[in-house]
Image: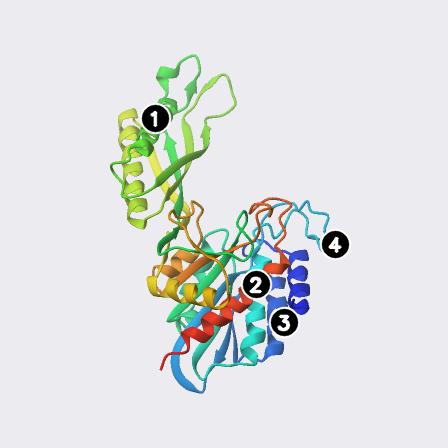
Amino acid sequence: MNKKIIAFRRELHQYPEVSNCEYQTTNRIVNFINEYRPDEVIRLGDKGVLFVFKGVEQGETIMFRCELDALPIKEVSGLEYASVNKGISHACGHDGHMAIVAGLAQKIATDRPDKGKVILLFQPAEEVEQGALDVMENIDFKNNEPDYLFALHNIPGLKKNRIVLKKGSFASGSKGMIVKLTGKTSHAAEPQDGISPADAVSQIIKRMHDLRENKTLFSDFILLTIIHIQLGEISFGTSPGYAEMRITLRAFENEDLRLLTSLCEKIVKEIAELEGLACEISYTEVFPATMNHDGCVGIVERAAKQNGLDVEYIKTPYKWSEDFGCYTEKFNACYFGLGSGNEQPQLHNPDFDFPDDIIETGINLFYTIYKSTFSYD
């Protein structure tokens, strides 16, 4: 096993930083990979970074992406390298993903491309949606856009080192819908003098649940989950004049997510107008569906088989979302799973720790993808 990479992964695990605060994590990455003499180190703002390995001749660009951010979850593991940052932990395995891409830098340093470029992208803020969008808007990224883009995610509950693939949609698109309903407060003894949004909230819940159960409108899986409702104040003498609802919308296909969004907006506006309420609708944490390119999926499958790895094609996309979907809307890309063990704690659990014994598998697979993609004439 690559002891240097394992030690580095554990260092990253011990010093996690949440989304948009990954300053020291980025510095650690830069200090580590600089040892392998990339031709360019390009900072994307004050957190993200590109490491560029150039061939002598002009050619295509292949990019490998990993994530920098940890989660606001208190670690409960008892590990000697457990998080020292209070209430923060690498409970999604991004420390392992970074270690894999750093290990790829080690291998490329001794086997550089003859032509084209290999770029290693360390991206901040995956967990909160904005990371990929900020990267794609950065002029230095635009000047280094990939012809092929690859990324992986560890998958707990799956045999270690098994590779999970799917053509088309791999993971759901999702968005957080925020609905604000404004009426007029009044005395609780005289509710007719005000305009309460209470009935509107009840109607919206009913209509949205009916929509969720209508399978004829959509081409594939959709889901809406009402996650939070605020109605008025805790005052028994006051009839409420304001309500706020938060709903998570999900779909395997981007077109279904657009349709679901439109229909939910129609429900809210119709009911608000009927009840005499002003309404405001906004969105947060918007993740497009992660849509894999068939050719890139084929590249990963062939590379996995060259490494003697089991390959599993899943029939149904994952319900969780990933901001890698922002890249797949524009670039030829493949996002795939790497099994992290049947007994591995689930993602975002407080006792999660990325298994060191799958790091080398990830490194070798990425390296084989790099070599096979650059084997064109």
Secondary-structure class at tag 1: helix
- Taking 223 as reference, is 198 above or below it? above
Query: Which disc number belongs to residue 32?
Result: 3
Residue closest to the eye, 341 or 145: 341
**Tag 4 or tag 2, which sits nearer the N-term?**
4
Label 1 vs label 4: CA separation?
Answer: 50 Å
Residue carrying label 1: 206
Q: Secondary structure at mark 3?
A: helix
- Which tag, 2 or 3, sits closer to the chain's start? 3
* Mark 3 vs mark 1, CA separation in Å: 54 Å
Which one is in front, 134 or 89? Answer: 89
Amino acid of disc 2? Met
Identify residue type, mark 3: Phe
Ranked by sequence position, the earlier of labels 3 and 4 is 3
The answer for how far apart the CA atoms under marks 2 and 4 are is: 20 Å
**Helix or strand or loop: what does disc 4 sit on?**
loop
Q: Which residue is mark 4?
A: 80
Q: Earlier in the sequence, mark 1 or mark 2?
A: 2
Disc 4 residue type (three-letter): Glu
Residue furthest top in the image: 189
Residue under pointer 2: 98
Q: Counting other residues with Cα less than 10 Å from the Cα at mark 2, is it few (<14), some (14-19), or many (20 or more)?
A: many
Query: Residue 219, percent across and down?
Result: 27, 43
The quarter holding residue 277 reads: top left
